[in-house]
Image (cartoon, helix red, strand yellow):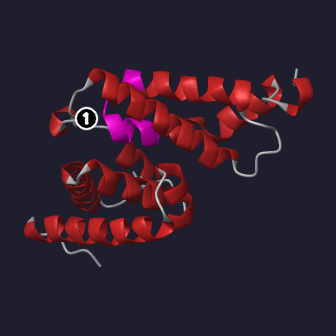
Amino acid sequence: TNKGGEGLDKALLEELYQRYGAEIFRYLYAMCRDRLLAEDIMQDAFCRALISLPTSHVNARAWLYMVGRNFLINEMKKRKREISSDHIEGRNAYREKSGNDTADGDPEEEAIRKEENSMLQEALLSLDERKREILLLNYFERFTLKEAAVIMGISYENARILSMRAKRELRRIMEVNGYEIS
């Protein structure tokens, strides 16, 4: 039940979870590289939505990302640990999101594509957290730079500059490793 327009009812929350749960999990997992933590944070974000997201909120998706991001940052501060690239898994959120659903394609092309995706993931993980986050939000989660700026709590101009620098650094890393980025 929705008392006085505050919070969401269960049916609307379930609809939001069906629509955005998997992508929010992928984003959180890409940020922290800890499956259990990403699941916990995602659940916390949806619980917060049940309690405090007004049904009239214009962009529930962006709001859920912002809440999830804030919970994750708070948890990471509590744990005071570095995110390391040692936790790269064979099947990861980037591959799932990158559209490699063509299993019946040429095996050689598929192997090259997997290698490129793996290299891209390693390159993304080598970026500092803010640069990685702006690229994840903008390209993998398909938020506009304006929306990504709101989620990250920075100005649009900062998001634009951060994105430009992140793309330049990512391109440089990929080119050093023999990959051409257009």
Residue 62 vs 25, above or below: the answer is below
In this rendering, would 122 be left or right of 28? left
The overriding secondary structure of the stretch rendered in magenta is helix
Q: Is 27 one of the magenta-colored residues?
A: yes
Residue 22: x and y in percent read 54, 37
For the point 22% across and 37% down, the residue is 88
Residue 142 at what x, y percent from top left? 52, 59
Q: Which residue is denoted by mark 1 in the rendering?
A: 89
Query: Residues in magenta?
Result: 26-37
At which x and y percent is residue 67?
Answer: 55, 37
Find out whether residue 158 is within the magenta segment: no
Give the camera-side residue of 158 and 120: 158
- The answer to whether residue 50 of the structure is visible from this angle is yes
Describe the element under mark 1 as helix, strand or loop: loop
Residue occupying image coordinates x 79% and y 32%: 12
Disc 1 packing (10 Å; few <14; some 14–19; many ≥20): few
Residue extending furthest toward the bottom: 182
Q: Nearer the viewer, residue 164 or 175?
A: 164
